[in-house]
């Protein structure tokens, strides 16, 4: 994992990305996941998602703790 410098640019916090992490275009999408921030390219964002999904093995979530049936609820 690479490290990046954080600095202030006026009143905004900025991150200086290493050259190999540069993005094409002028903007990106941001998503907070817990205490982490995920940066996704604005162009081709779904493509990078599909590429990342290929990193999971076929046994991913094969065994999971999932309820057998849903609870009965009062209808509207």
Image (cartoon, rainbow, N blue to C red):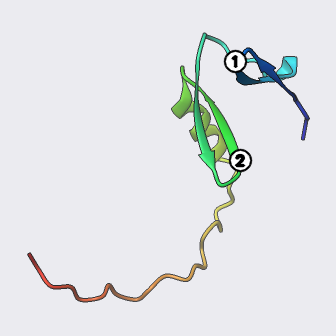
- Verify CB contact (< 8 Å) between mark 1 and mark 2: no
In this picture, residue 3 sits left or right of residue 10: right
Bin the neighbour count of mark 2 within 10 Å (Cα to Cα): few under 14, some 14-19, many 20 and up.
few
Q: CA distance from mark 1 to mark 2?
A: 19 Å
As helix, strand or loop, the secondary structure at mark 2 comes to strand
Which of discs 1 and 2 lies nearer the camera? The answer is 2
Image location of residue 58, percent across then percent down? 64, 62
Residue at 49% across / 82% down in the picture?
A: 66
Residue 63 falls in image quadrant: bottom right
Q: Nearer the viewer, residue 51 or 37?
A: 37
As helix, strand or loop, the secondary structure at mark 1 comes to loop
Residue sitting farthest toward the left: 76
Q: Nearer the viewer, residue 23 or 6?
A: 6
Image location of residue 74, percent across then percent down? 15, 85
Residue at 70% across / 18% down in the picture?
A: 23
Bin the neighbour count of mark 1 within 10 Å (Cα to Cα): few under 14, some 14-19, many 20 and up.
some
In this picture, residue 13 sits left or right of residue 75: right
Q: Quadrant of the N terminus?
A: top right
Which residue is label 1 attached to?
Answer: 23
Instruction: Note whether 16 is above or below 73 in the view shown.
Output: above
In this picture, residue 7 sits left or right of residue 49: right
Label annotation for residue 54:
none
Mark 2 or mark 1, which is nearer the start of the sequence? 1
Label annotation for residue 36:
2
In this picture, residue 1 sits left or right of residue 11: right
Q: Quadrant of the C terminus?
A: bottom left
């Amino acid at each position: 994992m690479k490290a990046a410098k954080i600095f202030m640019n006026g009143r905004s916090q900025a991150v200086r990305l290493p050259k190999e992490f540069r993005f094409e275009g002028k903007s990106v999408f941001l998503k907070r996941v817990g205490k982490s921030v995920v940066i996704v390219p604005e162009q081709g964002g779904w493509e990078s998602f599909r590429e990342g999904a290929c990193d999971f093995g076929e046994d991913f979530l094969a065994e999971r703790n999932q309820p057998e049936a849903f609870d009965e609820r009062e209808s509207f």
